């Protein structure tokens, strides 16, 4: 039996993001001067396919969720 463990995060607009933690390549905090991401973004989740997800959760919270699935 194969179990897929996903994490739940929230986008800056409050939308629910369900993410496979095995597909995350890196986390980073947005720069204060960077206007590429919506206001309220606390962590940028970079996926292995190159796409990015902006989250309301800070990177430490995202990292804890990732570690909780392993």
Image: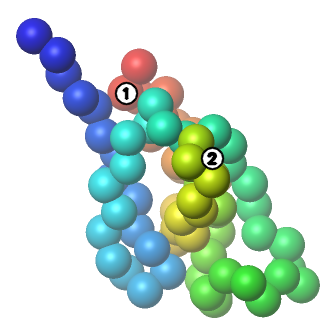
Front position in the image: 49 or 22: 49
Check the image and report above or below for 34 versus 22: below
Where is residue 45 drawn, in percent x and y?
Answer: 60, 55
Check the image and report above or below for 33 versus 8: below
Q: Which quadrant holds residue 41?
A: bottom right
Q: Left of 3 or right of it: where is 18? A: right
C-beta proximity under 8 Å, tags 1 and 2: no
Q: Mark 2 points at which residue?
A: 60
Which residue sits at x=74%, y=54%? Answer: 28
Q: Which quadrant does the C terminus fall into? A: top left
Query: Dot 2 surroundings within 10 Å: few (below 14), some, or many (20 or more)?
Result: some
Q: Which quadrant does the N terminus fall into? A: top left
Residue furthest toward the top?
1
Label 1 vs label 2, nearer the camera: 1
Which residue sits at x=31%, y=55%? Answer: 18
- Could you tell me which secondary element the residue under label 1 belongs to? loop
Marks counted in the figure total 2
Front position in the image: 11 or 57: 11
Which residue sits at x=24%, y=29%? Answer: 4
Q: Is residue 8 visible?
A: yes
Which residue sits at x=37%, y=27%? Answer: 69
Q: Left of 65 or right of it: where is 41? A: right
Cα gap from disc 1 to disc 2, whole angstroms: 15 Å
Q: Can residue 58 be seen in this view?
A: no
Q: Mark 1 points at which residue?
A: 69
Front position in the image: 37 or 57: 37
């Amino acid at each position: 039996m194969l179990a897929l463990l996903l994490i739940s995060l929230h986008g800056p607009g409050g939308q629910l993001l369900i993410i496979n933690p095995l597909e995350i390549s890196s986390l980073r905090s947005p720069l204060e001067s960077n206007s590429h991401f919506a206001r309220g973004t606390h962590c940028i989740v970079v996926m292995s396919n190159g796409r990015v997800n902006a989250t309301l959760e800070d990177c430490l919270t995202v990292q804890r969720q990732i570690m909780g699935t392993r």
